[in-house]
C-alpha cells in the first residue's frame, strides 16, 4: 500500500486502474522522449493528447504533468546535444526569443487550461497537431502545391466536425448528468425514510 495513495493504489504495478495508468506512462515516456530528442520536439504533442484521451487526469493536471516531465526530458536532450555536438549550431538569439515567448505564454496557458473540458481539449490539441504537421507530411511525400490546399481543406473540415461532435457529446453527457442528479438525490432521500 502506498502511504498517500491508499490501499491498492501503489506504484508497484498492482492495484487496478491506477496501475494500468502507470504501465501506459512508461512506454509513452519512452516514445515521447525519443520523438522529442530525434525531431527537436514532440514530447508535448505525443504525451499530452495521449494522457488527455486516457481521461484519468484533468486537463490542468495533464498539462502540469507533461510540462514538469518535459523540463527533465529537455534538460537531458540538451545535455546530450551539447556534449555530442557542442554549441556551434546554436543561435542564442533564437534561444532567447523562444524563452521570452514561452515564459509569457506558459502561465497564461496553465491558467486557461483549468477551465477546459478534457475531451474537448484532447480533440482540439490532436487536430491542431495534424494541421501543424500536414506540411511536413506533404513535403515528405512530394505532393504538388495544389494538393496542399485540398489536404488543408479536408483537415480543417474534419477538425471542425470532430470538435463539433465532441462538444455535442460533452453537452449531452452534462445534460444527462444534470437530469440524473436530482433523481439520485431523491432516491437517496427515499432510502433514508
Image (cartoon, grey):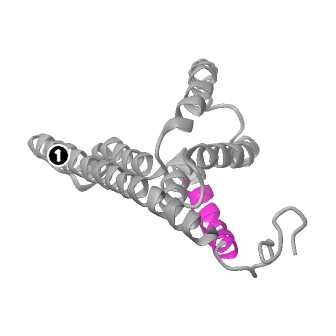
Q: Is residue 133 visible?
A: yes
Residue 13 is one of the magenta-drawn residues: no
Q: Quadrant of residue 172?
A: bottom left
- The one of 64 and 171 positioned closer to us in this rendering: 171
- The one of 50 and 16 positioned closer to us in this rendering: 16
Density class for disc 1 (Cα within 10 Å; few <14, some 14-19, many ≥20) is few
Residue at point 64%, 68% (across, down) = 192
- SS label for mark 1: helix
Query: Principal SS element in the magenta part?
Result: helix
Q: Is residue 3 left or right of residue 107?
A: right
Residue at point 75%, 44% (across, down) = 79
Q: Residue furthest bottom?
A: 14
Q: Is residue 51 above or below residue 113?
A: below
Q: Residue furthest right?
A: 3
Residue at point 59%, 29% (across, down) = 111
Q: Quadrant of the N terminus?
A: bottom right
Residue at point 51%, 36% (across, down) = 115
Q: Is residue 37 left or right of residue 120?
A: right
Q: Where does residue 92 sit, x and y in percent of width and height? A: 64, 21
Residue numbers of the magenta segment: 18-35
Q: Is residue 54 visible?
A: no
- Identify the residue under disc 1: 157
Q: Is residue 41 left or right of residue 82?
A: left
Q: Quadrant of residue 34?
A: bottom right
Amino acid at each position: 500500500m502506498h502511504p498517500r495513495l491508499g490501499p491498492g493504489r501503489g506504484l508497484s504495478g498492482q492495484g487496478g486502474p491506477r496501475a494500468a495508468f502507470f504501465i501506459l506512462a512508461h512506454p509513452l515516456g519512452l516514445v515521447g522522449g525519443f520523438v522529442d530528442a530525434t525531431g527537436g520536439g514532440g514530447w508535448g504533442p505525443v504525451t499530452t493528447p495521449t494522457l488527455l484521451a486516457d481521461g484519468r487526469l484533468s486537463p490542468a493536471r495533464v498539462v502540469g504533468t507533461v510540462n514538469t516531465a518535459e523540463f527533465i526530458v529537455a534538460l537531458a536532450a540538451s545535455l546530450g546535444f551539447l556534449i555530442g555536438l557542442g554549441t556551434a549550431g546554436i543561435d542564442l538569439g533564437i534561444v532567447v526569443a523562444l524563452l521570452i515567448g514561452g515564459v509569457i505564454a506558459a502561465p497564461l496557458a496553465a491558467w486557461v487550461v483549468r477551465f477546459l473540458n478534457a475531451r474537448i481539449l484532447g480533440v482540439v490539441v490532436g487536430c491542431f497537431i495534424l494541421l501543424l504537421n500536414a506540411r511536413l507530411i506533404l513535403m515528405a511525400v512530394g505532393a504538388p502545391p495544389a494538393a496542399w490546399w485540398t489536404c488543408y481543406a479536408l483537415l480543417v473540415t474534419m477538425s471542425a466536425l470532430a470538435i463539433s461532435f465532441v462538444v455535442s457529446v460533452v453537452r449531452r453527457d452534462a445534460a444527462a448528468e444534470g437530469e440524473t442528479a436530482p433523481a439520485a438525490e431523491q432516491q437517496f432521500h427515499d432510502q433514508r425514510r
